[in-house]
Structure formats: C-alpha cells, structure tokens
Amino acid sequence: MAELFVTNFNRNFTGVSATAANVIRQQVKSHEMELVGRPLPGCPEPIPVAKARALSRRVPPGRPFAIWHVRRNAEMRAALFARDVLRLPIRIVFTSAAIRRHSALPRWLISRMDAVIATTEAAAGFVPHVRAVVPHGVDTDLFAPAGDRMAAWAAQGFGGTTGIATVGRIRPEKGTDLFVQAMLRLLPDLPGAVALVLGRAAREHQGFLDGLKAQVAEARLADRILFPGEVPAADLPALMRALSLVVQLPRYEGYGMVPLEGMASGVPFVASEAGYYRAFAAQGRAGVIVAQEAANAAAQAARALLTDPDRHAAMRLATREIAEADFSARAEAEGIEAVYQALWAEG
C-alpha cells in the first residue's frame, strides 16, 4: 500500500512539473508511492485521483496516515476534499516557491495544509505553517556535461558553433523580449553564435511572439535567432549539454530551474536579478547576475564570457561542481523526507 501520493494535475510540462519529477525519481527509491494525475518523465505511471482516494482509505502499514504532496491550487483542493470531506487518513504537504503575496483563494488553501515547504527564505515569508526551507534541486544524473560539447551542438542541427538559449514560456513576465534584445546586440559580434528561444506562446501572447520575430527579421538575424518552440522534456537534457550559455532575463521568477539544469550540464549562465539566481551564481563562479530590464548589460556579460575561453572553461567546471554539491535533487528529496518523517512521528 502506498504511503506517499504525489500529485501532478497540469497537462503541460512546466517548471513545477520538472521539480516534482526530479524529486519523485529520488523518492521511488525509498517509498511505496503513487503519482496522481498526469505523467512525468522517468516517474511511475500515474493513477487517477479516484484511485488515489480509494487507496488512501486504509492506513499504510507502519504509518499513522499517508501523505499527499501537492504543488498547485487544484491539487490542494483535491487533497482537502479527500482529507476533510471524505475524512481519509491523510496529511497534506505543499511546496511553495512564490515570492509574492498569494491571492485570496491560494492563501486560504495554503492555510489548510498540514505542512508547507518553502523553496527559499524569501518564499517562506509569504506562507504559513512552514516546516522547512528546501531549495529545489536538479537531477544531476539526467542533466550532465557533454563529452564533446561542439559535437553535441552540431548534432542539434541549428548551425553555427556556439549555442545560447533561453527556456520558458514566451511572455513578457519571462523577459523573452529582453533576451531577444540582448541577442540582437550580441550576435553581430559573435559570428558563430546561434540563439534559441525555447518555449511556446499561449494564445494571448501570440502577438507578443510575432512582434519578436518581426524584430529579428528586421535585423536580418532570422537564421541566427531561432524559435524552435517547446522542447519535449525527454529531449531537453541533450540540448542543454550542447549549449555554451544559458540566458534567463525574467521580470519575475519564483525560483527558476533553467540555470540549474544548465549548471548540471556544465553550462554557465547570465541572468537577471530574479528567483534564486544569485544563489546559483555562487559569487560569479557559475553565472553572472545583471539588473532587471538590462538587456544591454546581459549582452555585455555574455560577450565577455564567451570571448574568454579560459574563464568559460573554468565556469563550466564550477557549474557542475556547485550543482552536485549544493543544488541536487537528492539533497532536495532528503530535505522533504525530513518533513515527512516529522509529520509521521507526530502521529
């Protein structure tokens, strides 16, 4: 019988999905568990919510209750229905990464959780019942450096010799326009560089995307600033390790996994002052932080890094070391496990 149920209700593979998958791949090693809702790469086949409720009716052997670990509003609602309406013997753990005040409904839902795990000290200040601050970690087995980066990049088929990418939904909040502005300044100075905008635009942001493509076309860089769309999760590790630089310039980010995925792949980053990026940068050993809305500064930082082979090589080594030592999925799973064990001990 399962003692742990981890929910994933979003049909899209988002940053929340990626962090959940990273942890689940660790948790299956030590728990009888079920993934509930939608599939995640490398994780057990999911079960429907109705089956999770049925399995939760009985107390798991050796435990006073099962734990449901949730990460989204809809998942909190489903878990609360199971615990408070169906009166199932479960406790609910919620992970929170937001570093801004939640709206009324999420605030109420979070207030009903049995335990909250915040991903940063800043996030902990916006939610109640925080049992631990546990930074998200990257799967350092899945994301790993290429043996031959140039060959790995050539295999991607985008042309050029140097890959630069931003990853995420195409919308103003994610700073996709700032990335394009930075690349319009940078690429004329780096003839072998190709920039990728990896992500999709929702219907309401299609005009925003069309405007970016028009800027690129006007600058005659449509063959070097590419919009390949959303990369399937299974294909992202191979693409990430082929890059020379990750550039993330969001206007808001709760945490931000993309630089970590690059770091585990031996790829340094340039990023705006957002999310947990400054901690990842490790005083400049793994990445360079620039101010918000600073496309020109981002271009200058990228140029300085990519035109200094010794510095770039040193950062490639440091990024992997920092990801393994400080931001691994294994360490995140251990921090979460401590919260589970404390709940079970309380009975």
Image (tube, grey):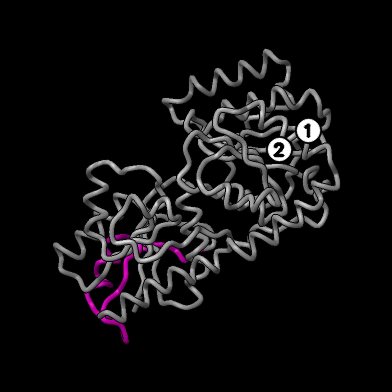
Q: Badge 2 is on which residue? A: 164
Where does the image place residue 270, in percent across and percent down from the top left? 66, 40
Q: Is residue 102 left or right of residue 156?
A: left
Q: In the picture, residue 56 is in which quadrant? A: bottom left
The residue to which callout 1 is attached is: 193
Which circle's residue, 2 or 1, is located before the other in the chain? 2
Splitting the image into 4 quarters, where does residue 288 fall? top right
Task: Give, as a three-letter code, the residue at label 2.
Answer: Ile
Is the residue 44 above or below the residue 121 in the image?
A: below
Image location (x, y in percent) of residue 258: 58, 47
Q: Judging from the image, what secondary structure is the residue with disc 1 in?
A: strand
Name the residue at 64% across, 64% down.
Answer: 324
Q: How many residues crowd mark 2 within 10 Å: few (<14), some (14–19), many (20+)?
A: many
Q: Residue furthest top?
A: 218
At 72% from the left and 30% from the top, the residue drawn is 300
Residue 13 in sight in this render: no
Q: Residue furthest front?
A: 283
Q: Which residues are magenta?
A: 43-69
Amino acid type indicated by mark 1? Ala
User: Which mark identifies residue 309?
Assistant: none
Q: Does 47 lie within the magenta span?
A: yes
- Which of the two residues, 266 or 134, is positioned nearer the viewer here? 134
The picture places residue 131, in percent across and down from the top left corner, at 35, 66
Q: Is residue 90 magenta?
A: no
**Residue ID at (43%, 62%):** 133
Query: Which quadrant would the C terminus be assigned to in this image?
Result: bottom left
